[in-house]
Image: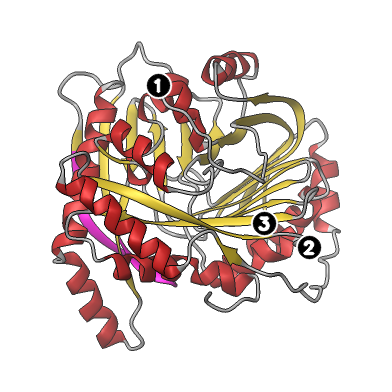
Amino acid sequence: MIIQIKDPQIFKQKALQWAATFDAVCYLDSNNFPDKYSKFDALIAIGAKSSLIANTGNAFEHLAKFHTENPGWITGFFGYDLKNEVENLTSSNHDELHFPDLYFFAPKHFILLKGNQIDIISDDEQFVLNIIQNYQIDEPTKPSSINIQSKFSKIEYIDTANEIKEHISRGDIYVTNFCQEFFAKNAMINPLEVFSKLNAISPNPFAGFFKWEDNYILSASPERFLAKRDEKLISQPIKGTAKRGITAEEDEIIKRQLRTHTKELQENVMIVDLVRNDLTRSAKQGTVKAEELFEIRSFNQLHQMISTVFCEIDENITPIEAIKNTFPMGSMTGAPKISAMNLMEEFERSKRGIYSGAIGYFSPDGDFDFNVVIRTILYNAANKYLSFQVGSAITYHADAEQEYKECLLKAKAILQALGQQIV
């Protein structure tokens, strides 16, 4: 069923509130950012006709079977620790979220929005349309107080970052993404309201609300991990961050400084090289190319340096294999990739889990699109544990105190959405 609607924003609000009453929901929103690779403005997958839960071991194999058995739209997430299936790695850091490493579902009801047009795919499309149009938007509730803590003090973070720089000086790695967890125990939140606030404060092109039973992913991600469009694979790693200016003039100065900043350029080009190498595993020979190098894109909270790498996919490579061949994404690992991942398991104090993983979809035409799970709140409502992680690239030229400040800058929108001050 394809129809025109008057107010897409109101429709999205009503549809998401109704969707959130189900045990399985995936809502992806581009927030109207221009993107030549995007197929729609928003996607809503509601309820599970069938689903797959898998942990590291043979999760990608299980997903390939599930994808074959469900040739329509399927949505889900990959956890970062699937790295242990892709490479000979382990994860033993503390985890209080207890999300699976992989979860996908084939939805009962599916909605695509583009402009003023919606497409509903369901066994009862008119029922879905009627219930959404007549749905009453809930009044916001007063947020509960939560106590945000960090696994690192500022001094501990700086000392650890400097230890990592010693490994770089020795040549063990060139660049890595060092992450720290902020968390709250006994946290009582309304996940949908928190997501709505986060998306209003920091609207980003790969935003998402994902629910699986009592587990929630509330994402304001600005980054695409990997997309397939016909015979083309596209990755758009982000490396390079700067704050927004108070005035338009200051903002332009900061953008120019970011575009010429030696450390930011170095980390971006190292990750672009890593992504190029990852894509060769799935590419037709000689087709891996980089375009739009060091492009500066501006978001509400900060400026980001983004590059685009693409290739033509080898006809013998399946969509699942293409993802496995590039997972985890280079922007969240480092170079050399395996050495950086190994080292971060030693220095980080929390299991990354869904953070540094990906949320997205497979479509019936064989295409897919997945984000990078950053700028994201993870919440286990059953045990009342709330978590978000932020990371920063550590290179030879990195200033540890500046990297700590960058982490807080990346956490700012999340803290505001939770009604908290900078910690």
Q: Amino acid at mark 3?
A: Leu
Which numbered disc flags the more N-terminal residue, 3 or 1? 1
Q: Is residue 420 left or right of residue 332?
A: right
Q: Which residue is mark 3?
A: 386
Query: Residue at coordinates 35% horizontally, 77% vertically from top-left?
Result: 244
Q: In this view of the protein, which residue sits in the foreground, 340 or 326?
A: 340
Where residue 120 appears, as percent x and y from the top left, is 70, 40
Q: Which residues are magenta?
A: 290-304
Image side of residue 156 versus residue 355, left or right: left
Q: Earlier in the sequence, mark 2 or mark 1?
A: 1
Residue at 62%, 24% in the rendered image: 72
Residue 297 highlighted magenta (yes or no): yes
Q: Residue at x 75, y 62 (%)?
A: 187
Q: Mark 2: which amino acid? A: Met
* Residue labelled with disc 2: 188
Classify mark 2: helix, strand or loop: loop
Q: Secondary structure at mark 1?
A: loop
Spatial CA span between label 2 and label 3: 9 Å
x then y, percent, for residue 292: 21, 51
Label 3 to label 1, Cα distance in Å?
30 Å
- Residue wearing tag 1: 88
Asked whether the residues under the numbered discs 2 and 3 touch, taking CB atoms below 8 Å apart as contact, a structural biologist would say no
